[in-house]
Every structure is written in C-alpha cells, then in structure tokens.
Amino acid sequence: MRNLIESDFGVSYIASIGDGSLFAAFRKGGTERIRSNSGLWETHIVGVWHFVEHVRTNNQTPIQHFEIKQLHVPRYRMAEAADSLRSGGGDIAEKGERFLVIAKDLQLRINTNGQWAVFGPWSHSIILPKDLSDKLEEDIKLLLRARDKVKRTEKDFEFGGIRTPSGHAICHSSQRLVEAISFEKAMLPRLKPQHFGIYSAYCTYKDFSMSEKMPLDLIQALVATQWGDDPNEIDDWMMEIFLETQNCFLPRSIWGRNINLSEREASEILAAGFQKLPIEKRVQFVLMNGMHGSGLFLPLAALTGCITFENYAELITQGCQPDSGHEQDRRKETTYIALYGDLAAAT
C-alpha cells in the first residue's frame, strides 16, 4: 500500500501513525507537471505542501478498510507559521514543543532541538525528513526577503514588484496580503495571474468590477440556474445546509421546499444580501462560482461558516478519483481561496 500511495499521489512516506501512514510532498507551484500513477498532469497553482494520511477506519472486522485524507497547505502559510515559531511565537505543547495550527487537524511544531515536526489526530509529533525541513528553512528566508520589499504608506501597504494585468498597483490595508503576494513573486519570479494564488485572487478583486458590486445579470443568472433544480430532489442534509445558509445570509429564504417566490423577487433579495457581504467574500464567491461552477448556495455556505472550506472541497470533488489532477487542483484552489479571505480581512 505504501508504494501504491507514493506512486498514485506523487508523495513520499514520512512515518507510520497507528494503523496508517503519513506521506508528504513539497509542490513548488507555477506551471508544474506532477507524476502520478495515472500519468503526468499539469497544474498552474501557486505552491503548496501536500499531506496524505492513510488510516484504517474499522478495526472490528477481519477485512481492512482504509481511508485517504488529504491536506494542502499554501507555502506562504507554512513559511509564516515557521518564521513565527522560529522567533518564539505559537503555543507550547508537551516536551517544550512550540506549535501553530496550519490547517484543520494539523499543527506545525518545532522542538527544543530546532527540528520541524507535524502533529495531527495521532498520538505524537512526526519529525519532517531533512529534505522537507530544508525546503521549509528556505521558504523562511524567502519570506523574510519578501517582507523587506513591502512598504508602508500613509494608509496602506505596497509591493512594487508586480502589477495586475490592468495596471493596478499591489496595495492593500492588509500587510499580510501584500506580503503573501511579494512572497509568491519571490518564489515564482515569472508569476502570472494564471498561476492561481493570492496574487491571482487580488487581480480578480482589482480588475473585475463584479467583485466590487455583483451585477444584476449575474445574480439573475444564478437565480435562474438555482430555479432549475427541484428542491424535492435535494437530499435532506444538503437542504438543511442550504436553508441555514439563506438564514445567515438573507432576510428571508428564497428557495426550498414550500417556498414560492418569483425569480424577480428572489433576485432582489439576493442582490441586497450580496451588497452586505464583505468585499473579500464577494471576491471568494466570484472565484468559487467561476472556477468550480459550484452554484449559488454551496459557496455561500462556506463563506457564511455553515460549512468549512474543507467540507466545500469534499463536496465539489465527490466522484473524482482522489489522486486525479482534477481533484488535486480543486483542493489546492480551495485552500488558496480560503487563505485569500483570511488575509484580505486582516488589518
């Protein structure tokens, strides 16, 4: 099984964890070809750390049942956490290890010997092998150089190393967002908007008016598409998510069982809801809807906290082969969309 996972996902074994194993890979990012058992697939996403956990799910039967869990962590988030831990930040765990949460169920740790480790829903820290530790140390240095290129103005933070395709400067009230773009430019000198990451999301924010104000024709198209679905054919658990999302986002529900509104009425209510949504969340919605074709309520469920972004990634990749390029790209895109929201909201 170990060789199969390494081959299928293009990852390397790190350690055994109970009835399973942990694997990882460092993805440089940009235009990149990754080898897997199903062949080469080309990706155009800024770099991530890819963790794959292979665990036994049923110990009560003679037949072994295993589950594959995946996490994709942006290189910026890993470097930022590592730099903070190296500087004495984070919380203290057992044996004096310092830690920061870098993703759901995953912590980055540094022990008293200066070794990097990860900790998840297992009983002990796992030391990263030297090749991965070296990559992390290199990214810390890259981050520090990128920070030096971010300048403070009277109102905002700026990075002069790149502009958007429409000529907008990289300028924002969030220092971390500008720093992340500077970091992406440092790690990918030929950074392009097609390399999806924080810079690409920023280009959507600055160069496309729909993130500033959702146009009525887009809202009407979203409503018309939603009205094409029969609410009686939606699973009960999904309908509960959709109704909870509408309760969080709108003054009244516009779609569901026994809800009878015209498309015009629904569009007006939805337009008012979008205008109250913070701009970084509107940018995230535009990205999720445009890149994933995930409809109206599923992106909004993640943006309103009715589901997590991890839940969202699971739902939009249902039916995909876990090691496929399609699933990997959707998961990486989702983690960057989530990170953009965190960074853009920070001040």
Image: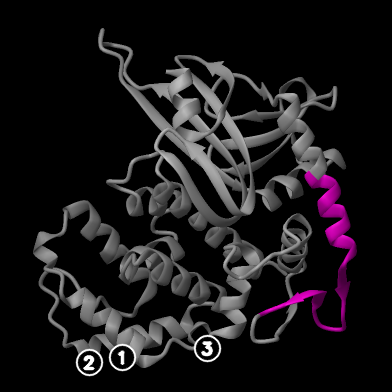
Residue type beneath disc 2 = Arg
Kindly report which numbered mark, 1 or 3, lies closer to the viewer in this rendering.
3
> Sequence-wise, which precedes: disc 3 or disc 2?
3
Q: Residue furthest top?
A: 62
Kindly indicate whether the residue at mark 3 contacts the one at mark 1 (C-beta within 8 angstroms): no
> Sequence-wise, which precedes: disc 1 or disc 3?
3
- Within 10 Å of disc 1 (Cα), the crowding (few <14, some 14-19, many 20+) is few
**Element carrying mark 2:** helix
The answer to whether residue 268 is seen in the rendering is: yes
**Residue 239 position (above or below residue 120):** below
Looking at the rendered structure, which numbered label has been put on residue 268? 1
Residue 145 in magenta? yes
In this rendering, would 139 be left or right of 288?
right
Q: Which residue is mark 2?
A: 264
Kindly indicate whether the residue at mark 2 contacts the one at mark 1 (C-beta within 8 angstroms): yes
Q: In this view of the protein, which residue sits in the foreground, 281 or 64?
A: 64
Kindly report which numbered mark, 3 or 2, lies closer to the viewer in this rendering.
3
Seen at 70% across and 85% down, the residue is: 168
**Residue 30, located in which quarter of the rendered image?**
bottom right
| Image quadrant occupied by the C terminus | bottom right
